[in-house]
Amino acid sequence: MTFPRIRDLREDKDKKQIELAKYLNVDQSTYSDYERGVINIPVEQLIKIADFYSVSLDYLVGRDDIPNRKQRKFST
């Protein structure tokens, strides 16, 4: 599964893949595979990436267009 925002955020912040790979404690090639959707990103890594960019997981994976939504309202 691909999450285009992971690459977009990295490029917007002028970060290199190697920087994120070090932060996540993975090889650069593994991080590259994450961005390209070659391998699935473990949930723990998605959380770390969201924390790195200070965005919600929903925004990171494309479920929300607002990066830092504090509270979601659900109707019942």
Image: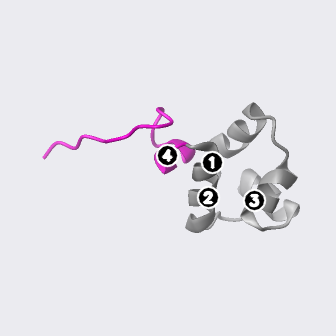
- Which is more N-terminal, label 2 or label 4? 2
Tell me: 3 left or right of 19: left
The 10 Å Cα crowd at callout 2, few under 14, some 14 to 19, many 20 or more, is: some
Figure quadrant of the N terminus: bottom right
- Single out the mark in the foreground, 1 or 3: 3
Residue 2 place in picture, x, y as percent: 65, 51
Mark pair 4, 2: CA separation:
11 Å
Examine the structure image and report whether residue 23 is included in the region drawn in magenta.
Answer: no
Question: Which residue shows up at 63% across the image and 44% down it?
Answer: 53
Residue under pointer 2: 48
At a point 77% along the width and 54% down the height, the residue shown is 20
The residue carrying mark 4 is 56
Q: Which residues are magenta?
A: 55-76
Gap between marks 1 and 2, in whole Å?
A: 14 Å
Residue 16, placed above or below residue 44:
above
Q: Where, by quadrant of the figure, is residue 40 drawn?
A: bottom right
Q: Is residue 56 magenta?
A: yes
The answer, for residue 67, to whether it is visible in the render is yes
Q: Which one is in front in this view, the residue at disc 3 or the one at disc 4?
A: 3
Which structural element holds mark 1? loop
Say which label, 2 or 3, has the lower sequence index: 3
Quadrant in the rendering for residue 18: bottom right
The amino acid pointed to by label 4 is Ser
In space, the residues marked 4 and 1 are separated at their CA atoms by 13 Å
The way the protein has been coloured in the rendering is one colour
Q: Quadrant of residue 21?
A: bottom right
Q: Between residues 49 and 61, which one lies in front from this camera angle?
A: 49
